[in-house]
Amino acid sequence: MLDTAGERVPVPEGTPQSASDPPWRRAGRQALAVAARPYWDRRDASWLVRRWPDLTATAVATVFFWLSLTPSLVPRPWYLQGVIGGITAAIGYGIGCLLSWAGPAVVRWRAGPETRRRVRARAWQVYWVLSLSLTVFLLGESARMQRELRELQGLPPTLTWHSIMITLLALGLCWSLLILARLIRLGTRKLITVLLRYVPRPVAVVSGLAISVLVVTFGAKDVVLERGIIDVASRIAANTDRSTKEGVVQSGSPYVSGSPQSLIDWDDLGYQGRNFTGSVLTAEQISAFTGEEASAPIRVYVGRAAAESYAEQAALAIAELERTGAFDREVLAIAGTTGSGWIDARTAEPLEYLYNGDTAIVALQYSYLPSWVSFVVDRQEAGRATSELVAAVQQRLAELPEEGRPKLVVFGESMGATAVEDSFDGIADLLASTDGALLVGPPHYSPIWSEVTEARDPGSPVWRPVYEDGEHVRFAQYPQRDLGRPEGPWGWPRVVYLQNASDPIVWWSPDLALQPPAWLDEPLGPGVTDEVNWFPFVTFWQTTVDMGMSYGVDAPHGHRYGTNAVEGWAAVLPPEGWTHADTLRLKEHAEARESPY
């Protein structure tokens, strides 16, 4: 019987053997035989390099690298291709090691040492000939597929694709990860060897593995991630939150938070709060578009530094809404913010234009961290903060006469959409509690989005689902076309999701590692190349990296939605007398106006 190094090991006494034994029984005997060897008899000093690399593992790692060269949702630069290739090759090597270990236990190969060495040498020769030629060919093919994907999504097809650098970067990262894994395994063996001096073997093995898992988990999560990467990101975000974007100044409008008349100090708004309030549209700007006398829009924003708790922030927001006269406006909108507190001007401004400035928008900042850090640290914070605000606004509105209340709408983009959804108990509650919602690029874990998508009408694709014949909820990537489907009646209130088929933030999920996603079912969505495929582990890492590149394309692709909020708001809550021509004119105006932040 052979161990993992190809050497014969004694079979435990009393273990029955038969050539007709099923593979699972032979595998069990193999595992028992390897485990029976004392740890102190193993050549740990040379184990790190002995018979490394393994042929089977190397071949599987190479295949995983090849698979990583396939396109995904958005185009990627060469250096990120190298990162994906290195990570997936390391995963492939680990799977290959498992196959290499299990092979002798499942398949009996009766051959002498000389024959095995000769076959192994020939196999390596075949590997080098095939792997080198196929790698060169597939790197060229990957460049072609990336160019075609760029052209499909409206980008120039020109592409810098350093094939040699991709290979070297992937190889270096893969080897670094493998060396780290081997060092961890070697350290675990050493620990078990020490424990064997004091406790029985089963206790030593279980304790050693448990300690190793705890140390690695603690080191990766608490030291590397939280005290390393996240701590650095937090420090940078904290410094940014205290600053102000160039060109943004304190507003003099009494209808804006942070103004001299406001209950909230300018310094307590945070970076994104100062951007949002300092770039507010003026009544003159709105009048120049509408041709009518306009009101100055109300923007209430409560920064994280303005109060100790979310409840206190919400109470301060209500007081600020009272001060500005927001409850006398025609429309009151609650905005969900992203991790840093960001609100997209291209989503907020169309509503203010639609209603000639007779609007009020209110939002809370729950964090100054980037969204990905907020997701890792505590994703629930977004929902807790927004829920407090929604509950406080609803309570105040309930105190007003029904005929005198403003229309209540909610909106949010990305993590802000999730924050809004977390504030309601499902789609029925959202429809019953508001006069409409505009949700842009919701992440895959958004609760109402998941509810609606899973319950979509049969035959509708996941990237453009039809829910209950589109009676209240509709999805759009090209709103002028998509919001008109299905052709059945569209009742009130309305919920519009702006959702791109190629948005990795919408489609990323841990399930991608082991389960094919529904967004790859035929027919594929707009902007998704037919050369994209699902591969275990590989697609997960491709989509993970895609999230970082989702802003590198033009709308409506990736996580870019441009001015689609114009059609979104015009569908959700059009003013009386609003026409399709008005929508087109506002969209043209929005496209000509550069976003202030």
Image (cartoon, helix red, strand yellow):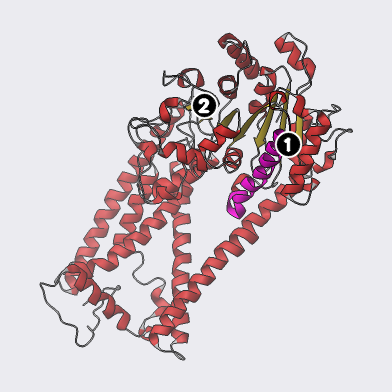
215 magenta-colored: no
Assess whether mark 1 and mark 2 are in contact (beta carbons under 8 angstroms).
Answer: no
The residue lying toward the viewer, choosing from 328 and 74, is 328
Residue at image coords 41%, 52%: 88
**Rendered view: 530 above or below 286:** below
**10 Å crowding of disc 2: few (<14), some (14-19), many (20+):** many
> Which residue is outermost to the front?
401
- Rendered location of residue 418, percent (x, y): 57, 41
Q: Give the numbered dot on residue 396.
A: 1
> Which residue is outermost to the right?
260
| Residue 487 is at least partly visible in this image | yes
Determine the secondary structure under disc 1.
helix
The amino acid on which the numbered mark 1 sits, given as a three-letter code, is: Arg
Q: Which residue is the site of mark 2?
A: 556
- Rendered location of residue 338, percent (x, y): 64, 41
**Span colored in magenta:** 374-400
**10 Å crowding of disc 1: few (<14), some (14-19), many (20+):** few
Q: Quadrant of residue 146?
A: top left
- Rendered location of residue 255, percent (x, y): 81, 28
Q: Quadrant of residue 171?
A: bottom left
- Rendered location of residue 501, percent (x, y): 45, 32
The amino acid on which the numbered mark 2 sits, given as a three-letter code, is: Pro
| Residue 2 is at least partly visible in this image | no
Q: Give the numbered dot on residue 89.
A: none
387 magenta-colored: yes
Q: Nearer the viewer, mark 2 or mark 1?
A: 1
